[in-house]
């Protein structure tokens, strides 16, 4: 006999639909609709300085016909991917050891306090944090002032470089990456670490052969999140990195900064929308790749 007090779940429950309606509506109005309009706008044209709702692929032909030549959009895109990947690597390494310090070195009753302190910058404005980094890293900023007091007369040039861009991005990513990696490390089975130590493994061997493999899923999530956010960010590259930077590719601006420059200096808004659509498609590809990597990491853990 079945227990009449147990109510089987129903996917058609009116109450369930009532609670789902607000978040779904919010998501549709403030994310899906603007994104769809962006994609549609990219296929419109400009005639006599007026946007005309006439379907055309001319904007994409204009973009890709000079992708690696006059416009340098292609090189800017490669530069952005390079900066995003390397920034995410540095951010994950930094936040991983910080999360390890909280999990393994801080007493359990104080871990929440240290975690709150680690994510405290997230509660302040991103733009204010970048302006603070400008004051610290500028050629006549706080850092060079301190180094000058120590006898180092040659100032460090950090702003308007890719190093400055990465510093701003790492500071932006750190709070969320710390949470992801903290949750991953706090669930690592301590008995496996102790067993490895009792079998003769050094601390470094236990870390590399036990802790890192068991936290591979969290590392994958953190890395994928860092790449996507770094690739789409525009403020750090503009305010701290100066919108351009020298790398092994050459001195090319970031793709997001080129979109902003195209928007500010060009009258063809549909063309700017097409550039942004290309960026969105690249981010979707990154998301799919990150999902596949996370799925493989989950299967290895299983």
Image: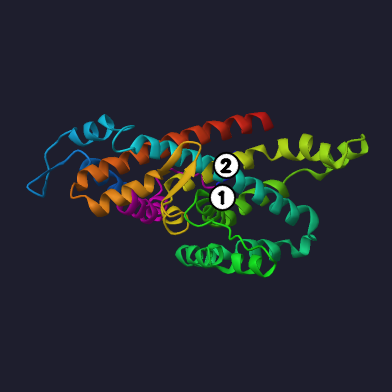
Asked whether residue 2 appears in the rendered view, the answer is no
Q: Is residue 110 above or below residue 173?
A: below
- Residue displayed at 93% across by 38% down: 198
Residue numbers of the magenta segment: 5-31
Is 232 part of what is drawn in magenta?
no
Q: Which residue is mark 1?
A: 5
Locate the C terminus by quadrant: top right
Name the side, left or right, on which 195 lies relative to 27.
right
Dot in front, 2 or 1: 2
Asked whether residue 254 appears in the rendered view, the answer is yes
- Residue displayed at 48% across by 47% down: 230
State the CA–CA distance, disc 2 to disc 1. 46 Å
Q: Magenta region's main secondary structure?
A: helix
Q: Is residue 17 above or below residue 109?
A: above
- Residue displayed at 42% across by 39% down: 283
Q: Which residue is mark 2?
A: 223
Locate the N terminus by quadrant: top right
Tag 2, which secondary structure?
helix
Q: Which residue is nearer to you in this view: 3 or 209?
A: 209
Q: Which residue is nearer to you in this view: 289 or 132?
A: 132
């Amino acid at each position: 006999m079945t227990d009449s007090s147990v109510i089987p779940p129903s996917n058609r429950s009116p109450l369930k639909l009532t609670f789902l309606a607000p978040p779904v509506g919010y998501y549709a109005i403030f994310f899906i609709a603007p994104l769809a309009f962006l994609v549609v706008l990219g296929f419109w044209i400009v005639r006599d300085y007026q946007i005309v709702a006439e379907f055309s692929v001319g904007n994409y032909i204009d973009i890709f016909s000079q992708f690696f030549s006059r416009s340098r959009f292609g090189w800017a895109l490669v530069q952005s991917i390079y900066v995003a990947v390397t920034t995410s690597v540095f951010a994950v390494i930094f936040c991983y050891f910080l999360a390890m310090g909280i999990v393994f070195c801080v007493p359990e009753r104080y871990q929440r306090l240290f975690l709150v302190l680690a994510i405290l910058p997230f509660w302040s404005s991103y733009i204010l944090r970048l302006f603070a980094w400008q004051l610290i890293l500028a050629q006549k900023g706080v850092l060079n002032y301190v180094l000058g007091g120590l006898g180092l007369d040659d100032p460090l040039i950090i702003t308007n470089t890719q190093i400055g861009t990465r510093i701003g991005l790492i500071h932006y990513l750190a709070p969320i990456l710390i949470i992801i990696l903290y949750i991953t490390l706090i669930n690592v089975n301590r008995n496996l670490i102790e067993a490895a130590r009792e079998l003769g493994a050094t601390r470094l061997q236990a870390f590399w052969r036990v802790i890192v493999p068991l936290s591979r899923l969290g590392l994958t999530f953190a890395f994928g999140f860092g790449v996507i956010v770094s690739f789409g960010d525009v403020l750090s590259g503009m305010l701290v990195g100066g919108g351009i930077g020298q790398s092994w590719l050459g001195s090319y601006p970031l793709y997001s900064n080129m979109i902003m420059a195209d928007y500010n200096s060009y009258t063809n808004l549909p063309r700017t929308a097409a550039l942004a659509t290309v960026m969105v498609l690249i981010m979707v590809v990154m998301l799919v790749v990150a999902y596949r990597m996370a799925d493989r990491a989950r299967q290895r853990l299983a």
